[in-house]
Amino acid sequence: FNKNYTIVEGIDQREIDLKDLAKKLKSELACGGTIKDGKIELQGEHKQKVKNILIKYGFTPNAVELR
C-alpha cells in the first residue's frame, strides 16, 4: 500500500529468538510488525532507532548496518 517499513535481517536464528526480538522492537518503537522468511518487518521508517535499540540489546555497532 505504498507505506514505509523497516526490515531487520541477517540475524542468526539459532543464537537469537527472532520472535522475542521482534516483540521488543515493536514495543519500544510503538509499531506493528511481523516475521517473514527469517526477517523482522516493522511498520514505519525506524532505521536509526532500530540500530540504537539493537546496540542496547548487545549487538556490536559494527555488526549493525543501515541501508
Image (cartoon, rainbow, N blue to C red):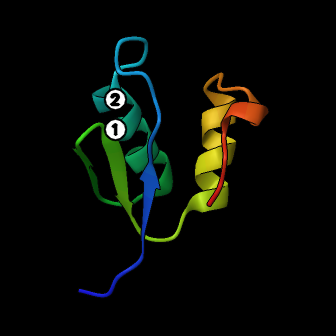
Amino acid identity at mark 1: Lys
Looking at the rendered structure, the secondary structure element under dot 1 is helix
Q: Nearer the viewer, residue 63 or 49?
A: 63
**Residue 29: x and y, percent?**
48, 55
Query: What's the distance in space between the residues labelled 2 and 1, CA to CA?
Result: 8 Å
Seen in the image, is 22 located left or right of residue 29? left
Seen in the image, is 45 located left or right of residue 55? left
Considering only vertical position in the picture, is 61 above or below 25?
Answer: above
Looking at the rendered structure, the secondary structure element under dot 2 is helix
Q: Residue furthest top?
A: 15
Q: Which residue is mark 2?
A: 18
Residue at 68% over, 32% down: 63
Residue at 46% over, 29% down: 11
Question: Is mark 2 in CB contact (under 8 Å) with mark 1?
Answer: no
Residue at 60% over, 36% down: 54
Amino acid identity at mark 2: Leu
Nearer the observer: mark 2 or 1; the answer is: 2
**Residue 49: x and y, percent?**
63, 55
Residue at 23% over, 86% down: 1
Which label belongs to residue 23? 1
Q: Residue furthest right?
A: 62
Considering only vertical position in the picture, is 35 above or below 20?
Answer: below
**Residue 58: x and y, percent?**
65, 22
Ranked by sequence position, the earlier of labels 2 and 1 is 2
The image quarter containing residue 9 is top left
Seen in the image, is 16 located left or right of residue 52? left
